[in-house]
């Protein structure tokens, strides 16, 4: 077994596939987020590129901080019921 697979924590520098796995997404989605500027650009190390785990954590936290909370079906139903009660009888939906 290679040493890299025996480490109990994520490595500091990761290639694209490992960085995507670290964030629980496909490599294609990860690279799209890099292209869109939502994930950091890689750091060149000789002939390869790597992503810093700390940069990935910071980028993910920034996405999380700016994301709107998803509305679940219960909350949607409650909102719609409340809106229906406050509508005037002449108002059309």
Image (tube, helix red, strand yellow):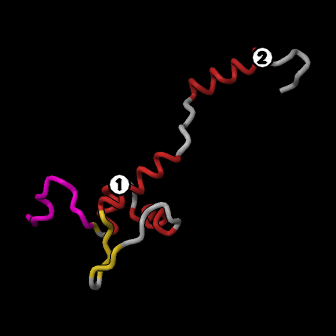
Please provide percent x and percent y for residue 5.
14, 61
Q: Residue at x 88, y 22 (%)?
A: 91
Q: Residue furthest bottom?
A: 47
Q: Residue at x 50, y 69 (%)?
A: 35
Residue 19: x and y, percent?
A: 32, 62
Please indicate whether residue 77 sits to the left or right of residue 13 in the image: right
Where does the magenta region start and end? 1-13
- In the drawing, does residue 45 fall left or right of residue 67? left
Instruction: Please state the horizontal and vertical placement of residue 28, each as a whole percent of the image.
Output: 44, 65
Circle 1 is placed at which residue position?
57
Pick the residue in front: 25 or 52: 52
| Sequence order check, earlier mark of 2 and 1 | 1
Residue 86 position by quadrant = top right
Tell me whether circle 2 and circle 1 mark residues in contact (CB < 8 Å): no
Q: Which residue is mark 2?
A: 86
The residue carrying pointer 1 sits among few (fewer than 14), some (14 to 19) or many (20 or more) residues within 10 Å by Cα, namely some
């Amino acid at each position: 077994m290679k040493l890299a697979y025996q480490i109990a924590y994520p490595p500091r520098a990761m290639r694209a596939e490992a960085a995507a796995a670290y964030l629980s997404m496909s490599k294609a989605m990860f690279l799209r987020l890099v292209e869109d500027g939502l994930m950091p650009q890689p750091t060149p190390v000789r002939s390869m590129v790597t992503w810093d785990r700390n940069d990935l954590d910071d980028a993910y936290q920034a996405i999380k901080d700016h994301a709107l909370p998803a509305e679940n079906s219960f909350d949607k139903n409650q909102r719609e019921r409340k809106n229906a009660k406050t509508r005037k009888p002449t108002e059309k939906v």
